[in-house]
Amino acid sequence: MGTLTMKFGGSTVGTTTALSQVVSIILQEYERQDRLIVVASALEGVTDALIEAAHLAGLSNRRGYRRIVATVRTRHLSLVEKLPLNANERTSLNADIDNLLFDMLDICQSMSNTATEETVPQQTIDAVIGVGEQLAARIIAALIRTKGLRSTHIDATEIIITDDQFGNARPLIDETRSRLAAYVQPMLERDIVPVITGFIGSTRNGQPTTLGRGGSDYTAALTAVCLGADEVWMWTDVDGMMSTDPREFPGAQVIAELAYEEVAELAYFGARIVHAHMIGLLKEQQIPLRIRNVYRPQQPGTLIHTSPKKHAQAIKAVTSIQGISLSTKRSGSLATIYRVIDAAVQESIGNTADVTISAQSSAHTFICVVIPPVIGPEGAANAQRKLRDHLENHPAITDWSIAPVGIITIIGSGISDQPHLIARVFDTLNDIPVLAMSQGPDAHNLSLVINVDDAPRAVERLHTLTITDA
């Protein structure tokens, strides 16, 4: 008993079957908890579609963005038609869907009318792409009401106050806490289940913002911290945090327990289930996080908290993400190349570069840049193209070569403090060349830079060293 925040990901709300599971879970936990808060993501694929629509509007491609909006409308209306709603709820939902999408079309039309050859401002894109969460929250709240509970949707633009870093905004905690206390706390006290839109917020003056890819996780952590939740449960379509990517490696297993620090490293280095920024918030308030499968709610999932069980063998997970290597056959100051890297990466993905490894000898310099996986599969390719363009236009550094690389990261408490484990890692890799290595300063990770074609083999071999019952 207590206060529970539950976040439902896009893969859990996109079909009638999934939504039936969602509502069943909500009903069950409503009976068990004193207070229940729900955070909703957009239907799977909708955010990507809306991003494309915004960019097409910026190119004055009216047919393109109108086609996408029509497809999104049809998908949501079709879903609503199949749900067990009464006539009034269905009519109201259909009207809400149309109103939200028509307002979004007006924004796209305005973008199209004023389009130039310059990049579409992220501020304008943010005003478009948060609509997916608004649609999903309304559908879930309507379904809850049909089961006899009081519920209402809440647009997070009213309660999550952020800075003006559009596309990757950071919440202003004190102001957000005040809004949540004023808007949401009274609902909880009256046994109303709020369904809050994830991913989105607004600046102090009301301009829509987004919290970055996977930002609905961040919203769940914010509401939990600001409203004093006892736990956060994230419902997805897998049984918990996995020892590696199950889509690529069928041998991946559920990790029963993890420390906050371990999950933070997993999120940063490639695990797509959690948003990296949410972990720090939860750790600060010591709020446990549990990852669970909406289709298999009887499974305990992965518990993330302060003190997981300790094991002598500490390797719990292996991740693989894309990176870009830059190298040159000389040494010297790196100030100019760092400025170029930052400018190119900022231009291509909207974030500054994270340089994970920088090494020099008397006649050679090597730099490896991490490309955050949350920006999508094209992120590394876009960043690489921009880097090439910048290097070609900067005569002082044209001798740098660029290549894609794989960054393999081994996660586990104290791994960097155990030389025997590091020795086993290199012994297991055997004939796979390691271009560079970095040990995390907090002793929770070991990252290896390898040729991109070797990444799948490296992950498969290193996964044999993992232990998942810790």
Image (tube, rainbow, N blue to C red):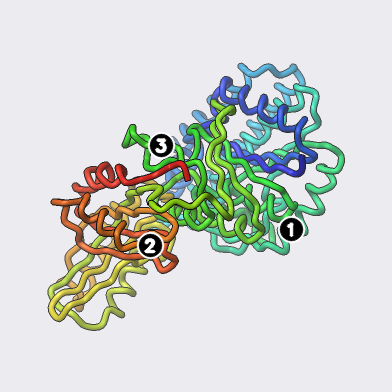
Q: Exactly how many numbered labels are in the figure?
A: 3
Q: Amino acid at mark 2?
A: Glu
Look at the numbered discs 1 and 2 and tell me whether their residues touch, using CB distance below 8 Å. no
Task: Select label 1 or label 3 by which is in front.
Answer: 3
Residue carrying label 2: 347
Q: CA distance from mark 1 to mark 3?
A: 37 Å
* Mark closer to the chain start, 1 or 2: 1
Disc 2 secondary structure class: helix
Q: Residue at x 50, y 58 (%)?
A: 261
Tag 1: Cα neighbours inside 10 Å, few (<14), some, or many (≥20)? Answer: some
Which mark, by number, is residue 177? 1
Q: Nearer the viewer, residue 470 or 404?
A: 470
What's under tag 3, amino acid-wise? Answer: Gln
Say if 352 sits above or below 87 in the image.
below
Residue at the front extreme of this rendering: 312
Q: Earlier in the sequence, mark 2 or mark 3?
A: 3
- The residue depicted at 52 percent of the width and 53 percent of the height is 259
- Mark 1, secondary structure of its residue: helix
Instruction: Determine the residue positioned at 54% across, 26% down.
Output: 295
- Hey, which quadrant is residue 32 in on the image? top right
* Kind of residue sitting beneath label 1: Arg
Q: CA distance from mark 2 to mark 3?
A: 37 Å
Q: CA distance from mark 1 to mark 2?
A: 33 Å
- Residue under pointer 3: 253
Badge 3 element: loop
Mark 3 crowd level (few <14, some 14–19, many ≥20, 10 Å Cα): many
- Observer-nearest of 376 and 224: 224
Q: Nearer the viewer, residue 444 or 94?
A: 444
Place of residue 144 in the rendered image (x, y in percent of width and height, measured from the top left): 73, 27
Q: Quadrant of residue 92?
A: top right
- Residue at (76%, 37%) from the top-left corner? 33
